[in-house]
Image (cartoon, helix red, strand yellow):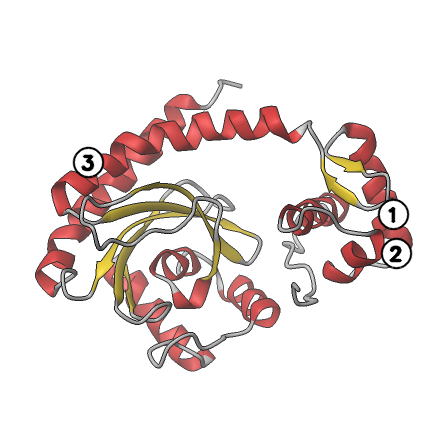
Amino acid sequence: MMSKKPATSNPGGVQSVNRALDLLECVAHRQAMTLAEMAAEVALPAPTAYRLARTLVDRGYLRQLPDRSYSLGFRLVPLGSAAHRLVGIDAQQVLTDLVEDLGETANLALLVGAQAEYVAQVPANFSMRMFTEVGRRVELHATGVGKALMAQMDDAAISRVVRARGLSRYTPHTIVTETALAAELGRIREQGFALDEQEQEVGVRCVAVPLAVGAGSWMAVSVSGPVTRMTNDVVERAVPLLQTAASRLVDRMSESEPSA
């Protein structure tokens, strides 16, 4: 069962919009949720959650099932398809080029709430390779893409993430204190890339760089593989290639955006 955590919405945004999006994101992790579960998950009073849910149902972004629980609505399908065309297809060739150059799995992730979500991946050709399901969400402090995303945030946003998600330990190498995390993010900002040194999974190493897509639209691109293959030499070669890939992705996404 998902843990009950307060919403991590940006307090500088429109509160009702943030709350509605929080509801959608929590339902996205479950096939169906009751109103009470939704309200508890995003720390909202039940009457507020009900009003937001009814609006989302009316607009087709949620639907109410016969047992009165809620699931995602069909209105999201064309939006998801449009987003996939914008991000997924544009990313595939860039990620494929990374795999051809480096031999390891390439990933694209974005910030969703207080986690990183993988939105595109091209796996390596090795029989032993890193694989993560597109759509999977991971904690920011314990992954290369997550730390690359976190390094783009200001201190207040980082504090909100830590309060909301904590600093869980996944391996003996995971960063679990705010002091160590702050030092790590400082290094990432200075050097321009992030490393996951077996912090999410023992035996796996990852290098990631952020995409300069603008405030509030944080993304990161990475390559990952077994520590036996992801040597320092590979990481050194990967960083400029990842930075080039990040620039290409930003350019492609800018070209795909409709003009105002």
Q: Nearer the viewer, residue 12 or 122?
A: 122
Tell whether 52 sits left or right of 253: right
Report the residue at 26% width, 34% height from top. Answer: 94
As displayed, is residue 102 above or below residue 247?
Answer: below
Read off the residue under disc 3: 97
At numbered mark 1, what does the secondary structure look like: helix, strand or loop? helix
Q: In which quarter of the image is the N terminus?
A: bottom right
Residue type for callout 3: Asp
Read off the residue under disc 1: 50
Read off the residue under disc 2: 46
Task: Estimate the x, y position of residue 100 in percent, counting from the top left.
Answer: 15, 39
As displayed, is residue 84 above or below residue 173?
Answer: above
Residue type for callout 1: Tyr
As displayed, is residue 33 above or below residue 245?
Answer: below
Label 3 close to label 2 by CB (< 8 Å): no
Label 2 close to label 1 by CB (< 8 Å): yes
Q: Nearer the viewer, residue 28 or 242?
A: 28
* Cα distance in 3D space between marks 2 and 1: 6 Å
Residue type for callout 2: Ala
* Cα distance in 3D space between marks 3 and 2: 49 Å
At numbered mark 2, what does the secondary structure look like: helix, strand or loop? helix
